[in-house]
Image (cartoon, rainbow, N blue to C red):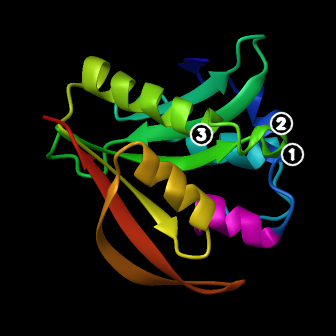
């Protein structure tokens, strides 16, 4: 598996992985809010941040070059260049359960440490997404907080997780 910079044409493939409105909110919280998801909605969401030097969307390719995952890295606090957040973490449903998510996240952690020189990475996961939470725990993320989030599809508990880099 390799990570490469996200390309606009990746969006159409990624959009096909979101099958229900609930999946859309589990994946993107309230950041997109349009279902069914179209690639152009993802690109519209990313457009204002691209080229800012504070937002890095990445696509994971398997050994045959097929797109199998995606996530972005962003700086949530403009005054702290040592902490980043992973978001929109997703793996192609056809290859879930085969460790692609943990491989992708390990590569993401390595990318953030080597290229962005960070010492902390965090992310959020909803408590109704236990498979994602297990994946995050498998690569070293630990819970540090929680909050309640309300969406058109329900009220969910969001668990904030972090990995500290030594």
Q: Which mark is residue 76?
A: none
Residue 3: quadrant of the picture? top right
Q: Quadrant of the N terminus?
A: top right
* Spot occupied by residue 117 in the image (x, y as percentages of width and height): 20, 25
The residue located at (37%, 23%) in the rendering is 111
Q: CA distance from mark 3 to mark 2?
A: 20 Å
* Spot occupied by residue 66 in the image (x, y as percentages of width and height): 79, 19
Of the two numbered discs 3 and 2 in the rendering, the one whose residue sits closer to the viewer = 3
> Does the magenta run of residues contain 30?
yes
Q: Secondary structure at mark 3?
A: helix
* Spot occupied by residue 72 in the image (x, y as percentages of width and height): 50, 39
**Residue indicated by mark 1:** 16
Question: Which is more N-terminal, label 2 or label 3?
Answer: 2
Q: Residues within 10 Å of mark 3 (few under 14, many from 20)?
A: many
Asked if the residues shown at circle 2 and circle 1 are in contact, with their CB atoms under 8 angstroms apart, the answer is yes
Q: Is residue 53 left or right of residue 22?
A: left
Of the two numbered discs 2 and 1 in the rendering, the one whose residue sits closer to the viewer = 1
Q: Is residue 119 visible?
A: yes
Of the two numbered discs 3 and 1 in the rendering, the one whose residue sits closer to the viewer = 3
Q: Which residues are magenta?
A: 21-31
Predominant SS along the magenta part: helix
The residue located at (57%, 57%) in the rendering is 132
Q: Secondary structure at mark 1?
A: loop
- 72, above or below 148, in the image: above
Question: Which is more N-terminal, label 1 or label 3?
Answer: 1
Q: Which mark is residue 101?
A: 3
The residue located at (29%, 73%) in the rendering is 145
**Residue indicated by mark 2:** 12
């Amino acid at each position: 598996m390799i990570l490469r910079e996200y390309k606009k044409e990746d969006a159409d493939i990624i959009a096909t992985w979101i099958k229900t409105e609930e999946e859309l909110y589990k994946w993107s919280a309230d950041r997109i809010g349009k279902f069914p998801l179209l690639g152009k909605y993802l690109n519209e969401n990313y457009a204002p941040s691209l080229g800012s030097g504070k937002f890095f969307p990445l696509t994971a390719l398997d050994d045959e070059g097929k797109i199998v995952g995606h996530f972005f890295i962003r700086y949530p606090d403009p005054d702290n260049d040592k902490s980043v957040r992973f978001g929109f973490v997703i793996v192609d449903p056809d290859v879930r359960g085969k460790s692609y998510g943990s491989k992708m996240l390990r590569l993401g952690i390595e990318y953030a440490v080597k290229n962005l020189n960070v010492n902390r990475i965090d992310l959020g996961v909803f408590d109704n997404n236990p498979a994602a939470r297990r994946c995050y725990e498998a690569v070293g993320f630990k819970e540090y907080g929680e909050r309640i989030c309300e969406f058109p599809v329900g009220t969910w508990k969001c668990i904030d997780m972090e990995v500290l880099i030594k």
